[in-house]
């Protein structure tokens, strides 16, 4: 992503900065998601919410509830379903949860009362009964062997699934025992163990994802509901929750990934070379023809025929039909022209959006100057409403072109729809796209009117133009999304989804409240306060 594109990726012209008092089309924005930001301070509380639900439902300790949730990737609904379908015992067995019936220490058969020593079956050493630990599953080994086992598992990235050392034992080890034994020798590894347990809530949870900001802001976003939605982090970054790329609706995630790759790699350069040049038969360098004659001369002085590509003299006349070569060249040229058509329009709207984003300060100055006049209007909210509608609709227009490029191409959906059906749907879509484009340009021109310098009757005229266009464009955007959902993607046998249309724009995540009177967790708070928190495993920092 270029630095220019990043300007649009972040919401410098945030939908939420000046939307106070906007009530138009709020009823259309049905709240299907609960979006919250999980910060360094609120991560532990966010984890506790799910832990409490399992603890209350199954009457378990926190560590057993965490083991169950990690096994089910923090999906409480899935855990509840399996509890009903499989029963409590089977649920516990699969997750490695063992409920100890008796807290009395169980000693192995090799325990000698006369010598008061215990033989560890791992290291075959006699140790004091106070230097062994028995897990809930009943297996007992010396503390040194347990510690080394825990360290190996943590270093191998198995902090969340450390199982008993006994052969074929599926039981998950008590996290408190792991923490205490490892901390006695290696406090840094114990801290890493705690951090991995804590971050499991994000790494293993399909409802929570890191904010992909670079540099990483330290936040994660939790969404209750459909993952196909666009969210805005409190750091200002807007992104698609499903794929963690920039917000790109009405383009689907698969289409946007293909488009982003196509714009970044050299595929179109190769297409241009195929269309515009031919290889010299002597030195094999690519030669571009700059005249009308089909006999061209390379810089190596070799003369060759542009039509057949063969080395020739000046008297050569090519009467052969090189059908395969001409078909390939024609296809490459057609593909290049089609790509450039969609790319130019995508880029034009993206560039317009960046330029129009600078209007915000200008509009605010005009509003301030107009409202300071005694004879001026006292309410200019229509100007800011129109500006934000312009931002949203311009972004939708720009991403509608990558969608159309793949939706109506020859490489993707020809097996699902006939050519006639595809052309009919293309005409329908392009008609809606054109209507939206025309009215967005009208709104852009109206917004740029210096209404602070106009007479009052002219200001009223501009005001009505902006209000009418704002309402119309909102309806056109909604209609385009319905067309894509119902007539285009909805007609395909394979599932392709887009984020739903939001009249108010990308939804900003709310802060997750932290309960100050909550009981401290058994997990070390150092895992939350560590400087390495959220700095090793997030995708954003892996890319840095």
Image (cartoon, grey):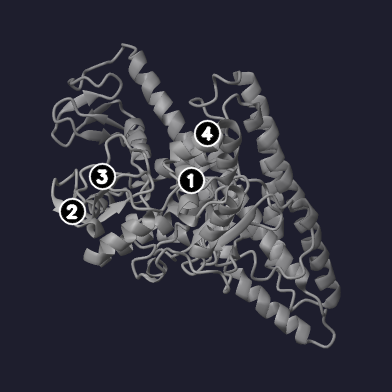
Instruction: Decide if residue 432 is on the left or right side of residue 2.
Output: right
**Residue 357 appears at what percent x and percent y?**
58, 65
Q: How far is mark 1 from mark 3, CA to CA?
A: 28 Å
**Residue 328 appears at what percent x and percent y?**
37, 22
Q: CB under 8 Å between callouts 2 and 1?
A: no
**Residue 87 appears at what percent x and percent y?**
56, 34
Question: Which residue is drawn at the image coordinates 39% and 19% (left, top)?
Answer: 327
Question: Which residue is drawn at the image coordinates 30% and 25% (left, top)?
Answer: 294
Q: How far is mark 4 from mark 3, CA to CA?
A: 66 Å
User: Quarter-wise, where is residue 413 in the image?
Assistant: top right
Q: CB under 8 Å between callouts 4 and 3?
A: no
**Residue placed under numbered mark 4 in the picture:** 406
Q: How far is mark 2 from mark 1, CA to CA?
A: 36 Å
**Residue placed under numbered mark 1 in the picture:** 68
Name the residue nearer the viewer: 104 or 26. Answer: 104
Instruction: Decide if residue 286 is on the left or right side of residue 96.
Output: left
Residue 25 visible in the shown view: no
Tell me if mark 3 has few (under 14), some (14-19) or many (20+) residues whose alpha carbon lies within 10 angstroms of its own: some
Numbered disc 2: secondary structure: loop
Indicate the quadrant containing the N terminus: top left, top right, bottom left or bottom right.
Answer: bottom left
Tell me if mark 2 has few (under 14), some (14-19) or many (20+) residues whose alpha carbon lies within 10 angstroms of its own: some
User: Can you say whether 32 is above or below 457 in the image?
Assistant: above
User: Can you say whether 306 is above or below 340 in the image?
Assistant: above
Q: How far is mark 1 from mark 4, CA to CA?
A: 42 Å
Tell me if mark 1 has few (under 14), some (14-19) or many (20+) residues whose alpha carbon lies within 10 angstroms of its own: many
User: Quarter-wise, where is residue 365 in the image?
Assistant: bottom right
Mark 4 or 2, nearer chain start:
2
Residue 510's tag is: none
User: Can you say whether 340 is above or below 22 in the image?
Assistant: above
**Residue 503 appears at what percent x and percent y?**
71, 54
């Amino acid at each position: 992503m270029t630095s220019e594109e990043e300007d649009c990726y972040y919401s410098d012209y945030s939908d939420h900065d000046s939307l106070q008092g906007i009530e138009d089309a709020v009823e259309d924005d049905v709240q299907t998601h609960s979006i919250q930001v999980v910060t360094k301070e609120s991560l532990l509380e966010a984890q506790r919410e799910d832990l409490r639900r399992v603890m209350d439902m199954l009457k378990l300790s926190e560590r057993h509830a965490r083991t169950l949730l990690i096994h089910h990737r923090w999906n409480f609904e899935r855990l509840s379903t399996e509890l009903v379908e499989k029963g409590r015992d089977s649920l516990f067995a699969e997750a490695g949860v063992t409920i100890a019936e008796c807290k009395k220490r169980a000693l192995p058969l090799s325990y000698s009362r006369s010598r008061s020593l215990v033989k560890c079956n791992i290291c075959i050493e006699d140790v004091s009964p106070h230097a062994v630990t028995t897990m809930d599953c009943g297996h007992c080994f010396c503390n040194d062997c347990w510690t080394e086992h825990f360290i190996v598992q943590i270093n191998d990235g198995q902090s969340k699934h450390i199982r008993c050392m006994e052969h074929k034992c599926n039981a998950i080890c008590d996290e408190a025992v792991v923490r205490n034994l490892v901390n006695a020798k290696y406090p840094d590894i114990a801290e890493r163990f705690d951090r991995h347990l804590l971050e499991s809530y994000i790494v293993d949870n399909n409802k929570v994802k890191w904010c992909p900001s670079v540099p990483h802001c330290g936040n994660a976003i939790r969404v209750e509901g459909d993952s196909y939605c666009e969210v805005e982090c409190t750091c200002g970054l807007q992104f698609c929750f499903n794929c963690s790329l920039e917000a790109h609706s009405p383009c689907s995630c698969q289409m946007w990934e293909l488009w982003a790759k196509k714009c970044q790699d050299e595929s179109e350069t190769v297409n241009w070379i195929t269309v515009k040049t031919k290889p010299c038969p002597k030195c094999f360098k690519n030669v571009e023809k700059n005249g009308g004659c089909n006999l061209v001369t390379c810089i190596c002085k070799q003369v060759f025929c542009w039509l057949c590509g063969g080395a020739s003299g000046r008297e050569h006349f090519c009467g052969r039909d090189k059908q395969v070569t001409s078909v390939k060249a024609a296809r490459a040229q057609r593909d290049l022209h089609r790509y450039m058509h969609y790319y130019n329009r995508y880029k034009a709207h993206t560039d317009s959006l960046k330029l129009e984003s600078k209007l915000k300060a200008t509009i605010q100055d005009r509003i301030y100057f107009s409202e300071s006049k005694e004879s001026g209007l006292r309410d200019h909210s229509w100007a800011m409403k129109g500006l934000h509608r312009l931002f949203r609709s311009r972004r939708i227009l720009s991403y509608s072109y990558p969608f159309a490029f793949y939706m109506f191409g020859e490489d993707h959906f020809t097996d699902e729809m006939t050519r006639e059906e595809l052309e009919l749907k293309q005409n329908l879509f392009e008609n809606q796209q054109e209507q939206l484009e025309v009215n967005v340009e009208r709104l852009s021109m109206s917004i740029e009117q210096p209404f602070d310098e106009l007479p009052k009757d002219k200001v009223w005229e501009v005001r009505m133009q902006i209000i009418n266009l704002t309402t119309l464009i909102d309806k056109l955007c909604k209609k385009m999304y319905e067309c894509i959902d119902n007539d285009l993607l909805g007609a395909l046998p394979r599932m392709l989804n887009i984020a739903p249309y939001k009249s108010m724009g990308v939804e900003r995540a709310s802060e997750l409240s932290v309960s100050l009177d909550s009981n401290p967790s058994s997990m070390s708070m150092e895992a939350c306060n560590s400087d390495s928190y959220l700095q090793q495993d997030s995708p954003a920092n892996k890319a840095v």
